Image (cartoon, rainbow, N blue to C red):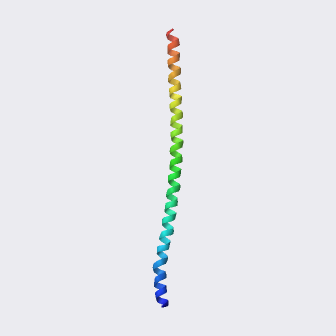
Amino acid sequence: MTRAWLVLALVILPGGCGVVETGATAAAGANSAAQQASQAKQTEDRVKQQLDAAYQQAADQRKAAEEAAK
C-alpha cells in the first residue's frame, strides 16, 4: 500500500510542477505583451508629434512663399 502511494506521488508531483511552470510562463508572456503595447503607444504618440511638426513646418513654408510672392 505504501508503495502505491509513493508511485502515485511520483506521478502527480511532476505534473503539478508543469502546471505551475505553465502559469508562470503565461504571466511572463502577458507582462511582455503589456510592455510591447506600452512601447507601441509611445511610438505612435512620437510619430504623431513628428507628423504634426512636419505639417506645421509645411504650412509655415507655404505662408512664407505666399507672402514673398506678393
Q: Residue furthest bottom?
A: 1
38 lies above or below 68: below
> 1 and 45: which one is in front?
1
Q: Residue furthest top?
A: 70
Expressed as whole percent of the image width and height from the top left, the position of residue 9 reads 49, 81
Expressed as whole percent of the image width and height from the top left, the position of residue 8 reads 46, 82
10 lies above or below 30: below
27 lies above or below 8: above
- Residue at x 50%, y 18% (from the top left corner): 62
> 3 and 61: which one is in front?
3
- Residue at x 50%, y 31% (from the top left corner): 51
- Residue at x 52%, y 11% (from the top left corner): 68
Expressed as whole percent of the image width and height from the top left, the position of residue 22 reads 48, 65
Total number of numbered discs in the rendering: 0
Expressed as whole percent of the image width and height from the top left, the position of residue 5 reads 49, 86
- Residue at x 46%, y 84% (from the top left corner): 7
